[in-house]
Each structure stands twice: as C-alpha cells, then as structure tokens.
Image: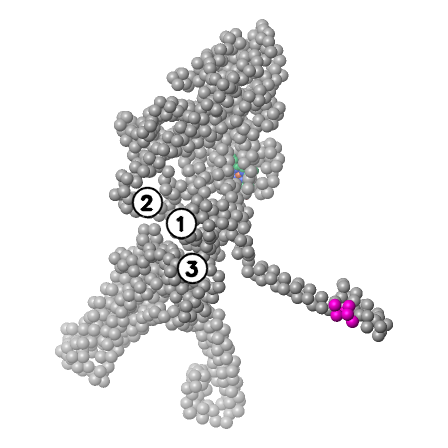
Amino acid sequence: MMEDDEASEEIHDEVPREDLAEAPGEVDEEGPIPTDINTETLERLELPSDVAEATQQAWRDYLNTHPSNISAGEAIYSSIFDANPGLQAAFKSPKASVAERFVNGLSDATRLAGSKGKLLSLVQILGFRHLDIEVSPQKVDLFRDALLEMLELEMGKRFPPKAQYGFALLLNYVGGAFIFIRREYQSRVQLIHSTWHAAKEGIREATAVTTAATDQSRRSSKHKDEKETVVNDISPVSREAEAQPSKFDNVVDEMFHFNVSAMGYSAKKHWMDLVLEQLDEIVINVSQSCRIREECEKLALVLAKYEGQVVISEVRSVVMSSLKSFISTWGEEHEVAWAWFWINVEKLIAELDGKLRAQERHLEDFLQTSSKEAVDHVVQNMHNKFFEIAPAGQEFFKVSKTRMYHIAERTLDLALALHRDPKQTVRDLSALGLRHVALSIPVEFFPPFVQGAVEALEEATEDEMVIRAFRWSVALLGKILTRTVIEGSNLVMCAINMNDEKAVKKAVAISPRGTRAESLLYVTVGTDSVSPLLWAIDCGSLVAAKAILKDLLTIRADRHSYYYGCDELFARHPHIIDHLIHTASSLLPTLLDGLIWRSRYAVEGKRRVNYYVKHLIEDSEGKFNQALKWIVQSRDTELVRHPALELVCDTIWERLALRLFLIDQSIYLIFLIVFVTGQSFLQHLNSGDPDAAVRTVTFICRLIIYLGSIPQLLLWHLRKIRANRREGHVVNVGVQCPVYLQSTQALYKLGLLLCLILMCILEPTFWCVSEMQGSYSGAGLFTQSCPTARPFRDIYSLLSMLAALFYWLILSNLSILSMRALAFCLLCGQLFGEFCLFMIALAFLILTFASSLSALEHESWAFSNIARAALSLWELSLGMASKAQLESLGDDLILFLALAAFATALLIFFLSLLVAQFDQAYEIRYEEMLGFARLKRCECVVLLLETVSLKSWTNFRESLQLEVPLEFNAGDVGIAGGLQVSEPAVKHPTARESIKRYAGSSSQSMPWPEEKLEHDEDPFDQLERDTGHSCSKFFHVVFFHLFSDIVYCAPSCLCKCNGYPVIISYSFLFV
Ligand code: HEM
C-alpha cells in the first residue's frame, strides 16, 4: 500500500508532449508476440529496460502523429470497437471520455513500464476501476491484437518489434491483473459492504437503546421537517432525506464528529461533513466503477466550492476509527480492505483536484463572454451532430427547431450549473432524468448525445481548455441522466409513462404486500426520492394516477392484518388535496371515495359506513388540517358536497365550531335586543313623550351599545385588517383594501360600525347634557329634545334605522344553522337578479303607458299627467288602486282599452314570465345553492377554527378517538383513523364488499395473490358482454325453431303450391 502512495503523485500525469523524441533508428527482433496472460498471481512485471524504452518511444511517436491526445484515443477506440463490436458493451461512457481514459491509462502504463513497483500500483488502481467489467483472457487477446494492429498500421516502421513486444507484454500484464483483481479482491468488496452494513445496523440498535428517552422530541422535530418538505412538495422530486427515514442516523454523524474532534480536525469539520454526506453512496457502490466515479466526481465538485484547504486523505483515519468503534471484530483484513478502498477513492477525487475551478472559469468565459455566434453555433449544431452519430435518435425529437435549440441551451447551462451549484443541479437532473423516462428515451442514446454536444463545441472553439471542461461536465450530465433513467425506469414508472391502468396494476402486483404502498409513493433516484403518484399527476398520466390512488386506497386483508395505503399517502403527500385541486381535480372524487367503506349489509334499514377522514381533520402534528380550507378556496360546489367532506365539515361544526359560532352570534343578538329596546321600543312609549325612568333606561341601552358594540366591532375589523396585511391579502382598488371586506358579512359589520360611530357623535342625549332642565317641551333627565340637538335628530334617526338594519343583516348569518335555510337565503340572492330584470321591465311598461295616457285627451284625474299616471299604474299593478281612481275612468273607451292592455301585458305576460323564470332558475340553481351553502358552512368552520384554543381543539380531537380501530361488520375490528356512522340503507345501495380478502400466506413479504381480471372489468363492458351472449343465445334458439318448423312444413307446402315462395323464404333465411 505504501507503494500506492508513492505512485499516486506520478501515475496520472500526462505524457508531456514536448518530451516526445524521435523513433529509434535501430530495430531489434524480439520473436513472436507474447500471448501469455497470467491471471493466477499479481506480481511485478520485469520489462527489460531497452524494451521499456522502445515501448515508451513508440507510444510517444504515436501520440505525436495525432493533433491531440483525445483524437489519439478516439483512433484506438475506433480500431478496437470496429474490430470487436462485442467489447463495446462494457463501455457505457461517451466515446470521448472512453478515448481519454484509454490514452491516460496507456500513457501511465508505458511511462511506468520500466519501474516495477509503480507499475504494480498503477494496475491495482486501474483494477479497482474495472471491478464491474467482466474482463477475460479472450477479451484481453482481442484488445491487444486490435491495438497492436492499429499501431502497426498507423506507424509502420516507427513501431518496431521491440516496442510491439513491450506493448504486448504490458497489455497482457494489465489485462491479467484486471482479471486477478476482480476475482481475488471480491472478498475485500464483500468485507467493505458487510462492515458498512453491520456498522449501520449496529448504529440503529444503539440508537434504539440510547435515544429512547428523546424519541418523542425527535419525532416531533421530524414532523416539522416533513412539513417543511411538504411546503416545497410541488415537485415530484424531493430530498429523500426529508421524505424517508434518513440512511444515516444522527448517532452516525455524532460518531464521525466525535472522531473529527478527537483527532484534532475540528477546524476541518465543515468540509469533512460534505464528504460524510456522500459517504454512503460511495461505499455502497464500491464495486460499480462507473457509479463510484460519478459519486467521486460529484463530491469533488462540492468540495471545489469549499473556500478553505481540503486534504481528502485525512478523512480516511476518521472513517476507519469510526467504523472500528462499531465493529467489534475489526481486524487486519478490515484494515487492508478499507485502506485499499479509500486510497482508490482518494485518487479518483485527487485526479480532479484543482482542475474543477479552472474548468468552471473556462466554461464561464466561453458561455458568458465569448462571441454569441460561437454559442449559437453549438446550440444550432448539437442535435445535428447527435443525429449524425445516432440517426435513430431523430425518432425521439419530433419537436420544433426552437425547442431543440432550447434543449441545447439548457444543456450548456447545466454544464456550467454543475460547477456553480452541484447539489441543486444534481437534484434538477433527477427531475430531468425522469422527464426522459417519461419520453421513453433508451439509455444507449445518451453517450452519442454527449458526443454530439462535444463535437458541436469543438467546431465552435479551438480553446482546448474549454473543450476539455465541457467534455467533462457534459459527460457527467450524461452519466447522471443515464443512471436516473435506469433507476427511474421501474415497472411502475413505465406503466405511468404508458398511462395504462392495467399496466399499473401489473407493475404493483409483484410488490410485497408490506411495501406495496411504498412502491407507489417512492422511487429512489440517486439520493433523491421521487413519488410515482405525483409524477403521474404532474406529467398528465391521469389514468395511471387514478389507478395508483385506487390501489392505495383499497383495503386488503389477509388472516392477520388489514392493509390500507391511506396513512402512507397522506404521510408522503400531506398537500395532496391542494395539489389535486390545482392540477388534476378530476382525481379528487377517486381519492375521497377511497376514504369510505360501506357495509353491504343493512340492519334495520341502516348501513354501517366508515369514513377514514383522519387526514382531512388533522395534520401530522395533530393540528387542524388545511384540506377544508383548500376546498373552500377552490369554490368547487360539487366537490364540497362529497359525503366524506360533508362528514368532516359537519363533525367539526357540530362538535366544536357550532358553540363558537353561537357565542359569536349571540353577542350580536344581545346587542340587537338592547338596540331595538333603546331605539325602536322605549322611545315610543307614552305617545312619544317618555318619562324620566324610560329616558334613563333608553340612555343606558345606548351607552351599552356605544361602549360594548363599537369596541367589539372595532376590534374585529382591526384583527381582520392585521391578518390580511400580514398574509398580503390586499387588493388594490385605488387604495389598498384588505380582502376580508369582499364578504357581505364584513361589509354589514363595517356599515354597522360606521353608523354606530356617527350615532355616538350625534347622540342627542349627549348634546342635551348641559340643558336638560331648560324651558322646552320634553325637558328633564336624559332628554333628547333640547334645541341644540334638534338639527341632528333626523340624521340620527336615519342612522338608527340603518344600524338596526345592519344588526338584522348580520344575524341573517344564523341561517347557516340549517343547510336548507342557508341554501334558500343564497337562492334569494341569486334570484334577485331575475327580480331586478322584472322590475326594470315593469318600470319600462309603466313609463310607456303613463306617457301615452298623458298624451291622450281624457277626463280622468288619476292619469292626468305622467307622474300621476305612473303612480296609478303602479298601484294598479300591485292591486292597490282605490275605488276613486277606477271611477275616474268614467266611460272613456280608449282609456279603458289602454288600461286593459296594460293589465293584460303585466298580469298575463310579465308576471307569468317572472314565475317561469323563477321556476327554471330555482330548479337549476337549488342544487348549486346547496353546494354554496355547504361551502359557506365550511368557510365558517375554517374561520372559527382559526380562533379556537389549543385546549378546545385537543379535546375535540380526543373526543373523535381517531386512534381506535373501527369495526367493519360486527366483530370484525379493522383499521383506525376514521369515523363510523349509520346511514339509511337506501342512500348508497352497496352490493359488493369493497375489502379484498385473501387466503393463504399472511407474510408481509409476499405479494398479494393475483387478482382476477373480471373484478377489474368495467360493469358496462360486462353488461354489454352478457347482453351479447344472451342475444346470441336468443337468436340461436329462435333460428333453430324457425328452421325446424320450415323443414317440417316444407314438403307439404311444396306439394300444395308450386314451391317458389317457399324456396325464396328458405334462401332469405339462410342469408
Ligand atoms: C446528456 C444528455 C442529455 C441532456 C443533458 C438533455 C437535456 C435535456 C433538456 C435540458 C431538456 C429540456 C427540458 C425542459 O426544459 O423542458 C430535454 C428534453 C428532451 N430531451 Fe434530452 N437531454 C439529454 C439526452 C437526450 C437524449 C439522448 C434524447 C433522445 C434520444 C433526448 C430527448 C429529449 C426530448 C425528446 C426532450 C423533450 C422535448 C420536448 O419536451 O419538447 N435527450 N433534454
């Protein structure tokens, strides 16, 4: 291992191009090309110094014949894979990346050919990077022969037999070493895996013991985290750490941090944390060369953003000592395996050390400061290049040119973003990868796409550094996307992309019953977790989304347990209702239906129904769930009348909100009584001249109103204004107006407040205080009749009338107590429009007739001018015309006919029309009004719950006993989280049991037995099929009888007539 360290500084330096020397003039024969590949041992290679020199020289010459190392590598790439296409399967990276690695590897190997120890270290490192590639002696033969052939062809005499010999020896050695390492080091890989796994398991056990006491507090903080996740839960891709239990428990972190401090690395904690964040992914992918390289590259990008100095080798000791403290059997083999692993990781990261910042700078310069034409050239040619390399890729780009340019631009941006904000970009790439899953892009196309992008850039710039930087970034993009596509393309995701219900059912059918819900809610893509359900909703695969929802909300049972995905659904997507309202409201009934179980048995005309509405009532913290609020905001009158929501609304209303509502309304009722007593009743006593006692009581009533009602209303408004301002709920109508004023109740309260304030200012009793005992009629204690108050009395009485009106209007809110009364009130409001139309028509009619009758010469005083005629006609319409008015008509025929025409038009036409309008509108609107009434009650519940105390809410929650399992049918104790009610059996006739019960094994790891397809068939399809069967049966029977009758009768008929008609009938029947 020490030798590894020594070699580390040198082996990855590129061959300096200025060192290239002339080819040796003298050529020695070294006999036949050696083909022995030693796969049994890993020893140092004894390459004679002259052979080593010749090999190095030949390699330098070869590189010299090419303009760049990459093109030299690409020539090797083509020669090897053209000769042996089968080898290509093992190389999944883009051509340029593989070519670069070929050149680097061969450069290192030839350079160290003469130095035995370093060459061994090199092959060990290269061997680590080939752990997942199946190298065999045959493949080594093919590789070697193809390479030698190509070098010979390209270089002719400058590739002497000695160099050929040296190359062959070197390639045999390296190939044999790969095979050896892959075989022999498997035990190290397994040890690393098992140690890591055991450490994690041990940690979990330790956690369970040591943190039991603090479990409760942790749980609550986890809830908080989940809530925060949910706030951003609009995207289907969310951090797995937030959505699922973290892979690392805090105790692991604590152990690492403890070792970081114990070893004196406290100052380096920050960057060490960055390494620890990615450690799990690196360790579990130890044998996946591509993946571990990707993880190391991502880590290098993150570390490159760190301002201070990073010495990655220092983490090794921290990791190892942390592991030692968890593994009691830690021994030398652990030591060797982990050191080997970590050295290789260090080397992968160290290869990029210092390069990444320079790459970022170069890319930035090119994309932001270089000429626009160069960037445009890349954008316009990226796809063309891709299509040249992989013509079949065109099939996937059935989009406009501008869209393709957009994709190319985004690719360039992503290449830079990877450097600027690696963590966020990797997250974005998970979402982008899933878009490609949705487009069913085969992963084979990613390397050519990357290649096309690089080639397009190569045409636009000659700056080698920019090309190198872009190649590296876009190759990493390609790798991450490819992995995301592979990981994201599970059966469920494919079914979602097909948007097919049956495919979803089939995909999920193989999941173990214990994790069936999880398979529909979590797909891990790298370190991120994607929700297939949300993905289906967001990409418009609503058939698949519906199938997922149905599956999650189907109750299944074996002998031991019930399975129902409701809790998992709401735990994963606490905002699912809101999300569905905004993106796929058609799925909401499916979700809400899934929360209801109805018994198929009716007892005494009643049916037992379980509503699993816990997650519509309370959130994960036990607070009032926002679902009802979202539904109110949606203003969906149909949705709000769903039985599950009606139950939630009514339960909260009856058990909690009603009390608050009545308290609120009773305040207005009391003030109204006091107001009416003071303003409308007492002052009329004693023929409008009340005595001192009455005046005193009146004054007290008014004081109660001014000192009670005004502050109460003022406070109410101030609170609303403050809340609206805080939440930014203001609308600009010239001035900033808080939105609460959009409600009619708020306007009534504002009107009442203004009236009361003005009344208080103009209060006659106050104005008369100084002259109570004056010499005017009505003088005395608390008089209102003093001369000073006289000018305000009219306006005061008008305000008083308005205030009384407002009090009554506020109390009209009491109609909320009954849904029907509320619906009626709302309907009155709705029909008011029709009534206004009628009144306009009536006014028009009256004006028409009034002006015509005034123009007519007649004797009747009742129709003598327009105003009088209009009044008389109005009275006539209302049936209030006096006898004198009618008598004034005399026997004027024309006047009589005109009035008859008026009455006919009004009574027969307009009134009938009004009735018809009301009738029609009532029928159409009543159902809608019931929805609005329900919405109003929900809104009232939501508003009242904002003011409810925590204690009342907790008492209410406890009274619901949502944790107690509900019985299905008698004696069958089922699932908790619901409310049970009995409803009239005829309300929702239910003939089929909705719980799917299965016999057989009740192991959680077993999938559910296959469901019969008949269950899934659409009832209408079934009906059609059954009807079809019955019809064909019927037809067969009828045909058979007819046919036998005819056969039976035919001979006699043929005898009786000349036979033609019967023959014709026969032929028709057969046709
Ligand atoms: C490194 C490889 C790739 C990168 C970085 C990449 C990047 C992108 C980006 C940024 C978008 C646009 C997303 C948006 O803004 O809506 C996109 C969309 C798309 N990509 Fe890729 N892509 C890659 C590989 C591929 C491959 C190999 C194919 C097909 C053979 C492909 C086909 C598509 C298609 C069809 C679209 C959607 C076009 C549309 O929505 O109109 N991509 N890709």
Mark found first going from the N terminus, 2 or 3: 2
Q: Name the residue under label 3.
A: 596
Instruction: State the quadrant of the C terminus.
Output: bottom right
Query: Which SS class for mark 1?
Result: helix
Query: Which SS class for mark 2?
Result: helix
Q: Quick one: which residue is furthest to the top in this view? A: 26
Q: Looking at the picture, does residue 576 appear above or below residue 1070?
A: above
Q: Name the residue under label 2.
A: 222
Amino acid under label 3? Ile
Neighbour tally class for label 2: few under 14, some 14-19, many 20 plus, Cα within 10 Å: some
Q: Looking at the picture, does residue 886 appear above or below residue 203?
A: below
Q: Where is residue 972 in the image (x, y as percent from the top left)?
A: 39, 59
Q: Position of residue 325 (x, y in %)?
A: 30, 29
Query: Which SS class for mark 3?
Result: strand
Q: Do the residues labelled 3 and 1 touch (CB within 8 Å)?
A: no
Residue 553 occupies quadrant: bottom left
Amino acid under label 1? Glu
Q: Mark 1 points at which residue?
A: 568
Neighbour tally class for label 3: few under 14, some 14-19, many 20 plus, Cα within 10 Å: many
What's the residue at 27%, 56% (across, down)?
950
Please provide the residue range marked out in magenta: 1044-1049
Amino acid under label 2? Lys
